[in-house]
Image (tube, rainbow, N blue to C red):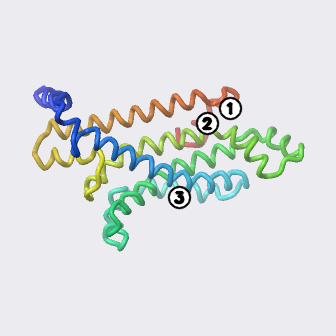
Amino acid sequence: MTILAGTWSWLTTAAHWYGPDGIWTRLGQHLLLTVVCLLISCVLALPVALLLGHLGRGGALAVNISNTGRAVPTFAVLVLLLLTPVGSFGQGPTVIALVLFSVPPLLTNAYVGMREADPDVVRAARGMGMTGWQTVRRVELPLALPLVLTGVRIAAVQLVATATLAALVGGGGLGRIITAGFNLASTPQVVAGAVLVAAFALIVEGLFEAGRRLVPYHSRGNRTGAGGTA
């Protein structure tokens, strides 16, 4: 009860929200790191997944990459990168580690979404004379959109939770509140940092859920459990 009261007191102290070490500053750093890593991951993973899904090849490759990425701890990747020349590039190791961590759900869900596009609709599109690119853009991608968005949502939420590791290598973000709490032996501050990260992740989850509901009803469906990661 004392820890909870101390956590509430820490969060409701105005001085903790402002300044270079304040919550708003750390939240902005956390958001920027998450958005940058998510954009890089989408640029790298989605074109490959959509192409493999359209061609119907490389499914085993996508699944194996996904499983391997989930099995390797992000912190271990971060430590290994710090031991290489990449470690001298500021936030470079953190960005690379987070991108590697967020690629698997993007790759898997987009690939599965493309493969689960209604084959009759795809054949009809080809029978109408659509080219491969037109079939992808007008038929397969709209049908795969729910699973593609699910992959993006999962990657975003995971990034929010994992970006706290940036603080361990001198980076910014909400993780600095937690590490500062450990250094000060302040359990309420550590708990407050964890609460802020969890709340941020829930907000991101809610925003993506709201975005999913905006997807046209005919392509929304309930296919998240068919093969992708829900």
Amino acid identity at mark 3: Ile
**In the image as oriented, which residue stretches furthest toward the bottom?**
85
**Residue annotated with mark 2:** 146
Badge 2 element: helix
> Quick check: 80 above or below 228?
below
The residue lying at 68 percent from left, 55 percent from top is 51
Q: Position of residue 45 (x, y in %)?
A: 56, 54
The residues tagged by marks 3 and 2 sit, at their Cα atoms, a distance apart of 22 Å
Mark nearer the N terminus (3 vs 1) = 3
Q: Position of residue 202 (x, y in %)?
A: 39, 32
Quarter of the N terminus within the rendering: top left
**In the image as oriented, which residue stretches furthest toward the front?**
19
Mark nearer the N terminus (3 vs 2) = 3
> Left or right: where does residue 38 sit relative to residue 178?
right
The disc at residue 96 is: none
**Residue annotated with mark 3:** 65
Label 2 near label 1: C-beta < 8 Å? yes
Residue 76 in view of the camera = yes
**Residue annotated with mark 1:** 219
